[in-house]
Image (tube, rainbow, N blue to C red):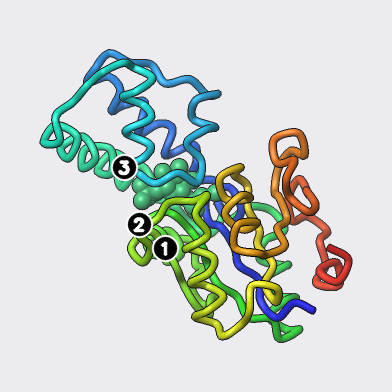
Amino acid sequence: SYKACLFDLDGVLVDTAIYHFQAWKMLGENFNYQLTEEQNEQLKGVSRVESLNRILDWASYSATEEQKEAWLKEKNDNYLHLISNMNPSEILPGVVDFLGQIKAEGYKIALGSASKNAEIILEKTGLMPWFDLIIDGNKVSKSKPDPEVFLKGAEGLGFSPAECIVFEDAQAGVEAAINGGMKVIGIGEASVLSDANKVIPNFIGIKSADLLLF
Ligand code: B16
Ligand code: MG
């Protein structure tokens, strides 16, 4: 049975996707490109560098490495400004209740996020104390769907992949968990996350006992 729960951050615990979307849209103004919501969907769980590459590709814009570096910094500055006032009210519904239940049952809890800003967000929302281990974009070299972020989580907690269950909202993240040999619960729509073992819309009403049914 499961010993640990590995949580993605953006889209699972908090909704920072809206801030990433705004920050990328602001950046797109530099090269007259308007990012759509459908495209933003494809950037979920994807690293900052890879996201910029995809956007430049969609815009058919070829930038120098130097220009890309400057734009990565600009996007992150936009993003940091947007998340500067985040607070506990932005934790997604049902999350704190579920974390409390699994903690009480003795499950270990780790973060498995592509974001290099994960710790800032956990601090601002007050989620930090729940975590036994944080694996974020600063600790991995391969982007989801590579399983590195979740394998490091399992290993850091001292469990095998089969003892871990992953919660993910993005297609790339669901694939990462599967590639790592882990069970994965999709958060969102079943049509988008069809490879997940089960999909739930959010954590409202989800009990720690449900882990045994997943
Ligand atoms: P940063 P997750 C991901 O977070 C976001 O979904 C994705 O949109 C973002 O580009 C990526 O983090 C990198 O974030 O620019 O803050 O390093 O879903 O893996 O928690
Ligand atoms: Mg996510």
Give the CA distance from mark 1 to mark 2.
Answer: 6 Å
Give the CA distance from mark 2 to mark 3.
Answer: 11 Å
| Camera-nearest label, 3 or 1 | 3
Q: Earlier in the sequence, mark 3 or mark 1?
A: 3
Out of 99 and 175, give the one closest to the viewer. Answer: 175
- Identify the residue at the far left of this view: 66
Residue 84 seen by the camera: no
Q: Quadrant of the N terminus?
A: bottom right
Q: Earlier in the sequence, mark 2 or mark 3?
A: 3
Residue at 55% x, 23% y is: 38
Residue at 21% x, 42% y is: 73
| Camera-nearest label, 2 or 3 | 3
Q: Position of residue 154 (x, y in %)?
A: 56, 75
Task: Name the amino acid, label 2.
Answer: Lys
Answer whether labels 3 and 1 touch (C-beta < 8 Å).
no
**Which secondary structure, mark 3?**
helix
**Mark 2 — residue?**
116
Task: Name the amino acid, label 3.
Answer: Val
Mark 2 C-beta closer than 8 Å to ligand 1:
yes
Out of 108 and 61, give the one closest to the viewer. Answer: 61
Give the CA distance from mark 3 to mark 1.
Answer: 15 Å
Please tell me how crowded label 3 is: few (under 14), some (14-19), or many (20+) other residues with Cα within 10 Å. few
Q: Position of residue 206 (x, y in %)?
A: 81, 61
Specify whether 121 is left or right of 102: left
**Mark 1 — residue?**
136
**Mark 3 — residue?**
49
**Which secondary structure, mark 2?**
loop
Q: Which quarter of the picture shows residue 78?
A: top left
Residue at 76% x, 45% y is: 201
Residue 103 higher or lower than 37, as above or below: below
